[in-house]
Amino acid sequence: MFSIVPRDQKFFDLFEEIAELLSRGAQAFVDLLGDYGHREQHLLVIRQFEHDADAVAHRTYERLDRTFITPFEREDIHSLMRRMDDVIDGIDAASKRLILYEIATPRDWLLQQADILRRATRCVQQAMPGLRTVRRPDRIRSHLMELHDLENQGDDIHHAAVAELYAGAGDPIEVMKWKEIYDLTERAIDRCEDIADVLERLLLKSA
């Protein structure tokens, strides 16, 4: 139905703003692992991205409270923003654990996880502008398929990493530390697939 009250287009700017922060945060995580001698400096960069993402989420929720007509249903906007915020929270949490637990050297499995996460967040960033023309789903669907594929790859890496961790029968404290770091990183990858699920729901509702 046609409405003489325009939908607030600012939400699209907010979606794209936080999606860029996810992508930059994941790249900063990769940079931290690749330049581990300067991990404290890289953590500060990640922490700033996390704070900025929180601010974008807060602005979005405030706008929801005062906007009469939104481009999508309110619960979908809230769900999309919450899941994007969860991704950067996961990156921040995994990065902090590396320093808090005094991890001497990042393991190869974590490097692989971080690369999957970097690719997934980049895919989210590329998909987000398609929401402006959601009635043309081809602009989003290829990114959704890629996100599902990346999540499957992330699962395989996580399973292999944990299996190797337990098979090694090393120091149980070290095992616990690494299990938590692997899990936090995997959870961030999972949230990227959750974003894909929300986007798919938006496509279906707009069809």
Image (cartoon, grey):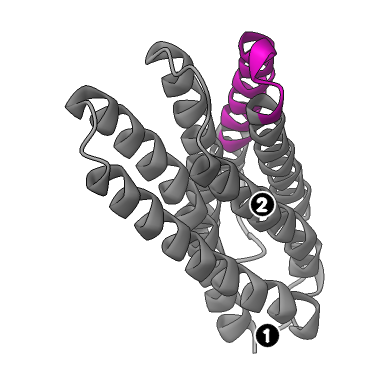
Label number found at residue 1? 1
Mark 2, Cα crowd under 10 Å, few <14 / some 14-19 / many 20+, is: many
Q: Is residue 56 magenta?
A: yes
The amino acid at mark 2 is: Thr
**Position of 124 relative to 166 (above/below):** below
106 drawn magenta: no
Question: Can residue 136 be seen?
Answer: no
Q: Quadrant of residue 93?
A: top left
| Residue 158 image offset from top left, x and y in percent | 41, 54
Tell me the tag on residue 121: 2
Instruction: Say which of 29 and 134 sits in front.
Output: 29
For discs 1 and 2, the disc positioned in front in the rendered view: 2
Between 47 and 186, the residue placed more toward the observer is 186
Q: CA distance from mark 1 to mark 2?
A: 35 Å
- Residue 95 picture location, percent across and down: 52, 25
Residue 1: where, in percent of width, then height? Answer: 68, 85
Of 42 and 169, which appears nearest the observer? 169
**Residue at (47, 37) in percent of width and height:** 90
Within 10 angstroms of label 1, few (less than 14), some, or many (20 or more) residues? few
- Quadrant for the C terminus, please: bottom right
In this picture, which residue range is highlighted in magenta?
34-57
